[in-house]
Structures are given as C-alpha cells and as structure tokens.
Amino acid sequence: MKIDENDAFRIFINNRETEKIDELVKAINTVVEKNVDCKECGACCKGLMINVTESEISSLSTYLNTKETDFKNKYIEESLNGQFIINTIPCHFLNDKICSIYENRFNECREFPHLHKSNFKQRLFATLIHYSICPIIFNVVEQLKLTTGFLINKFETNES
C-alpha cells in the first residue's frame, strides 16, 4: 500500500526540521486519536511483538491472580539476554477485537503507535511498517503528507 510514495515521503521528511515535524505529528495525532477507538480495532494486538518488563509481569500476574512463574510459563518468552516478550502473536489477551486486560495492558501497548513521542523522523521507518494496519498511523501519515506539502511537491515533480 503506497510503498513507493511512503519511501519518497520518508526521504522528504528526513530533510525537514526535526522539531517542526514532531510538533506537526503531535498536533495531527491529537486530532486523529480522538476519532479512532483502539478498542474497536485490535489490529496491533494481532501483529505486534510486545516487550514486557519484570514489573509488568508482577503486576499483571497479581491482577490475574496467578503466580509469576505460572504467568511467565504461559504468556512470556525470555531472550538469551534476559528481555521478556509476549510468547505468541496475536496476543493472548486479545478477545475478538478487545484487549481483555485493557486497563492493565503493557506499557508498549499503551504507548503504541508512539506518535506522541519526540524524534518522529527516527521512528518513521518502523512507523510505516504499521501504516497499513493501524488507522491512527495511516491517518496521521496521510495528513502529514498534506500538511508538509509532500503531495503537492510529488505531483509537481511527476508532472514536470
């Protein structure tokens, strides 16, 4: 979906001032997020690899009234360097399109799609990986293309 256009957009954005792009993305994201109910989508839960912290394991095992070791055995995989991740995709806690632990979900789930954070340009490649599955990312990127004049420049270049 728009692979060539998004590659060109990535190059276009990399030539813009970081702080201005961050301001635009945050402003656009604020508007877009209000119009998308993540609890009605669940697409990210079907495809993201989620890192989990030890404190999140402890907290969620308490919430689910299970021992941490049992929780880890059932839901978590540990890498050789000691990093924890959810051990299956889609996420165990996705029930249809709804997160069954939504109020207690992992921090990476809360933070996704990370559009409120600084240094958007550094994350743009990773953001575009989720462009076709996340309606927030899709709409923010498309609005950013318009706001920055990318589409106008693209059409002028194509017509020349």
Image: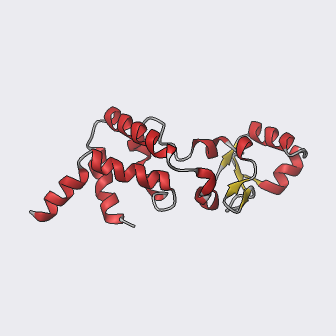
Name of the residue lying farthest toward the bottom: 1
Q: In which quarter of the image is the C terminus?
A: bottom left
Give 98 or 5, whichever is nearer the viewer.
98
Q: Position of residue 65 (x, y in %)?
A: 90, 44
Q: Where is residue 52 in the image (x, y as percent from the top left)?
A: 70, 45
Q: Quadrant of the N terminus?
A: bottom left
Viewer can see residue 79: no
Lateral position of residue 130 relative to residue 95, left or right: left
Q: Position of residue 118 (x, y in %)?
A: 44, 35
Residue sitting at 31 percent across and 64 percent down? Answer: 4
Is residue 16 placed above or below 1 in the rendered structure?
A: above
Give 112 or 76, whichever is nearer the viewer.
112
Viewer can see residue 94: yes
Task: Report which quarter residue 138 is drawn in.
Answer: bottom left
Lateral position of residue 159 relative to residue 57, left or right: left
Q: Where is residue 109 in the image (x, y as percent from the top left)?
A: 63, 46
Residue sitting at 74 percent across and 41 percent down? Answer: 104
Residue sitting at 34 percent across and 38 percent down? Answer: 21
Residue sitting at 59 percent across and 58 percent down? Answer: 41
Lateral position of residue 154 relative to residue 80, left or right: left
Give 40 or 12, whichever is nearer the viewer.
40
